[in-house]
Amino acid sequence: MPQVVVDVVLKPEISDPQGQAVLGALGRLGHTQVTGVRQGKHFVLDVEGTPDEAELKQIAETLLANPVIEDVELHLPTD
Amino acid sequence: MRIGVITFPGSLDDVDAARAVRLAGAEPVALWHADHDLQDVDAVVLPGGFSYGDYLRAGAIAARAPMMRDVVDRARQGMPVLGICNGFQVLCEAGLLPGALTRNSHLHFRNRDQLLRIERADTAWTSAYGRGQTITVPVKNGEGRYVAAPADLERLEGEGRVAVRYVGGNPNGSLRDIAGVTSEDGRVVGLMPHPEHAVEDLTGPSTDGLGFFTSVLKAVVSA
């Protein structure tokens, strides 16, 4: 069954306190090479038949992400 | 006067909201999110809580409930709607109010009595107050930080759409100390603090919250 992946991250201008908390923990663990963390969501959708890109785009942009605060990327199966 | 209070799976403050409606002198009507019948109510309150466990985003799934389609349609025709805490999140997710509520900047759940300033005393839910009046009601949230794009914030301020602002300390990092906003027509109001928990001396820090519920009585009569 084809799988469609949707990645959602907060827009760059929206502050991400969870990502900052992760960054703080990395600093305390001595991982100084990491200078920024943005935390997001990763959805894997099982799709029956040939994925309908327009419908999937609508799902991603109207339910899985809130366009007021989040950017969304849709990854369709490549084969 | 009939005021509906919608219960979603995970709503917590629907009973307190109904009690506040009754204390204000109206008849509370219990509504269930999965129904498609507003039962001829004159106004609707969306209560606080954790609908659907805040899964996906706070209020996101509740905003797509069958009853919410009726609420959105009626609100666009001028029916007063008040969203408190999770209800505010639902109204933003449903597109009835601008902006969004995100994780508190300090990452802590914050629960305390909060001083607020009424910025708009001419909405359906705030006319019992005076402009600039300060009130004390409880605030309790983990995802209450109000955000919007900079241009949208400017527009909201320019249009006077900030209904309530935090004073004496911002509990969650909300931009511009915004505690609540209103729709263009002033009929829909959403706020993170809980006026329904401040309606009786016995159980609240004040009775300052009652004004939200008495305001709407006038709004409905004059509509």
Image (tube, rainbow, N blue to C red):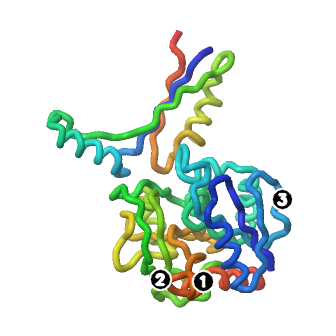
Measured as percent of width and height from the top left, residue B24 is found at 69, 85
In this rendering, the label closer to the viewer, 3 or 1: 1
Q: Is residue B159 visible?
A: no
Distance between the alpha carbons at the discs numbered 3 and 1:
28 Å
Camera-nearest residue between A57 and A7: A7
C-beta proximity under 8 Å, tags 2 and 3: no
Q: Position of residue A67 (x, y in %)?
A: 51, 46
Left or right of residue B222, residue A56 in this image: left
The residue indicated by pointer 3 is: B37
Of marks 2 and 3, the one in the foreground: 2
- B219 in relation to A70, above or below: below
| Residue for badge 1 | B199
Mark identifier at residue A72: none
Name the N-terminal-most of marks 3 and 1.
3
As drawn, is A38 to the left or to the right of B163? left
Q: Look at label 3 and name its amino acid.
A: Asp
Q: Residues within 10 Å of mark 1 (few under 14, many from 20)?
A: many
Q: Please give the name of the residue rendered at 57% of the width and 86% of the height, measured from the top-left corner.
A: B202
Instruction: Residue type at mark 1: give it.
Output: Val
